Amino acid sequence: MQQFNGRCDLHTHSQASDGMQPPAENVKLAKQRGLSAVALTDHDTVAGVAEAQQAGREYGIDVVAGVEISARAGGKDIHVLGYYVNTEDEQFLDRLRGLREAREERNHLIIAKLQELGLEISWQEVIDGLGRPLEPDESIGRPHMADVLVRKGYAADMRDAFNRYLAEGQPGYVSVPRVAPEDACQWIKDAGGAAVIAHPGLYGDDELVRRILEDSRPDGIEVVHSDHGPEEERRYAELAQEFGLIQTGGSDYHGVRQGVVFHGDLGSKTVTIDVLDKLRAAAAKS
């Protein structure tokens, strides 16, 4: 009989955004790895949550309805995680739809910039690379384009595609207007959820992170993440204590592309089950 370890991975992605596998597969993996709970936090969409929660009932895994909202502050892309959101809230769904439309506009601009660089890549190739029809409310991201760049020989692997073309500051990078983190936090709370600032270590600017916490008043901050080392975890745990925030964590699992797991394997970064109680309590106050 499967033994659950009281651990939770609160940051995973599926095919509903830029993950590699169906939502149910994330839940199956969580069970195989002995987790007690897993959150599905796709970018700007909750399209995969229903499937994940159905799989959770089948596997006996607690599946948290989540989302990862794209925001911008201080000239940087900032991500805000939402937990226990109402996935049927029409206002929230409409707001997410607007974000996906901005994302699609950005995607076409990226393709145009890559073409200007002499790279033969088309939007249709990105869609074809999915290997399946694009479902309603799903979102396409830079990893999908990176996958095409690797397959066509323009990059050695996914990281090389980002480092050479798609990462911030590189020639294929495009930024479009985004909501502010404080708006993203408010949207999540309006939808009955708990708001958490994602992977602060990736922003490379702790003063900006501090300002975001002051302005946005989130419920938590992601202390444990696949791209955080021990020093980052210590620093953000202290920041969480200073601001009275819930300390969350997760792998930021996107699946395997070109033989590489991004950002970390599901279940490799976890928090204890009591974090869910704290997030539920915060969501209840929304």
Image (tube, rainbow, N blue to C red):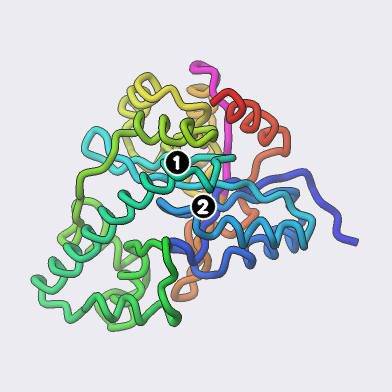
Q: Is residue 244 left or right of residue 8?
A: left
Q: Nearer the viewer, residue 271 or 18?
A: 18
At horizontal 36% and vertical 64% (from top left) the residue drawn is 140
140, above or below 10, in the image: below
Crowd class of label 2 (few under 14; some 14 to 19; many from 20; radius 10 Å): many
Residue 216, image x, y percentages:
38, 25
Q: Going by the picture, which residue comes out furthest to the front?
A: 90
Work out how far the residue at label 1 is from the one at label 2, CA to CA, in angstroms. 9 Å
Q: Nearer the viewer, residue 165 or 215?
A: 215
Q: Nearer the viewer, residue 254 or 133?
A: 133
Label 1 or label 2, whichever comes before in sequence order: 1
Question: Residue 250 has which mark?
Answer: none
> Which image quadrant for residue 74?
top left
Residue 168, image x, y percentages:
24, 51
Q: Nearer the viewer, residue 149 or 25?
A: 25
Check if residue 255 falls in the magenta segment: no
Q: Secondary structure at mark 2?
A: loop
Q: Is residue 171 left or right of residue 278?
A: left
**Magenta segment boundaries in residue numbering:** 241-250
Q: Going by the picture, which residue comes out furthest to the right?
A: 1
Residue 11, image x, y percentages:
55, 49
At horizontal 86% and vertical 54% (from top left) the residue drawn is 3
- State the residue position of label 1: 199
Question: Residue 252 has which mark?
Answer: 2
Q: Secondary structure at mark 1?
A: loop
Give the quadrant of the N terminus.
Answer: bottom right
Count of picture labels: 2
105, above or below 274, in the image: below
The type of residue carrying mark 2 is Asp
At horizontal 44% and vertical 75% (from top left) the residue drawn is 258
242, above or below 260, in the image: above
